[in-house]
Image (cartoon, rainbow, N blue to C red):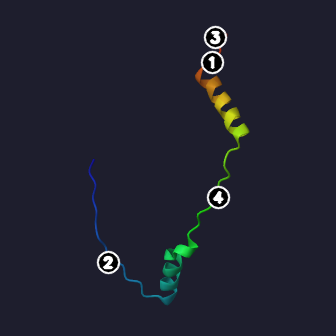
Amino acid sequence: MATSTFERKICIQSPNAVRRLSHAMDPKNDKKTNPVPLYTSEERSRSEDLLKQLLFPSKRS
């Protein structure tokens, strides 16, 4: 698999851009919470049962 890398000089001239970059790189602004709610055990078992039905169809079909 071929990969390529390159270096590019970044020049930030706008004071507003510097402020936004500084804000984005600040570790205090790192969001550690997951925005997607986790499955409950009931939902997980229901999903697994549905998957098993798809993987192992009944012999009557």
Instruction: Answer left or right for 39 relative to 4.
Output: right
Indicate the quadrant where residue 4 lies.
bottom left
Crowding at label 4, few (<14), some or many (≥20) Cα neighbours within 10 Å? few
Between the residue at mark 1 and the residue at mark 3, the CA separation in whole angstroms equals: 7 Å
At 65% from the left and 13% from the top, the residue drawn is 61
Reading the chain from its start, which is encountered first: label 4 or label 3? 4
Point out the frontmost of discs 1 and 4.
4
CA–CA distance between discs 4 and 3? 41 Å
Q: Marks 1 and 3: CB-CB under 8 Å? A: yes
Tally the marks.
4
**In the image, residue 38 above or below residue 29:** above
For mark 2, does the 10 Å Cα neighbourhood hold few (<14), some (14 to 19), or many (20 or more) residues?
Answer: few
| N-term-proximal mark, 2 vs 3 | 2
**Cα separation between marks 1 and 4:** 35 Å
Amino acid type shown at disc 2: Lys
Q: Which mark is residue 59?
A: 3
Where does the image place residue 51, in percent across and percent down from the top left? 62, 29
Q: Nearer the viewer, residue 12 or 50?
A: 50
Residue found at the far top of this picture: 60
Q: Disc 2 or 1, which lies upstream in sequence?
A: 2
Return the residue at label 4. 35
- SS class, disc 4: loop
Measure the C-alpha gap from mark 2 to mark 1. Answer: 58 Å
Q: What residue does disc 2 label?
A: 9
Q: Residues within 10 Å of mark 1 (few under 14, many from 20)?
A: few
Task: Single out the residue that lies furthest toward the right.
Answer: 42
Q: Residue flagged by tag 3: what amino acid is it?
A: Lys
Check disc 1 and give the amino acid type: Pro
In this figure, which residue is indicated by the disc labeled 1? Answer: 57
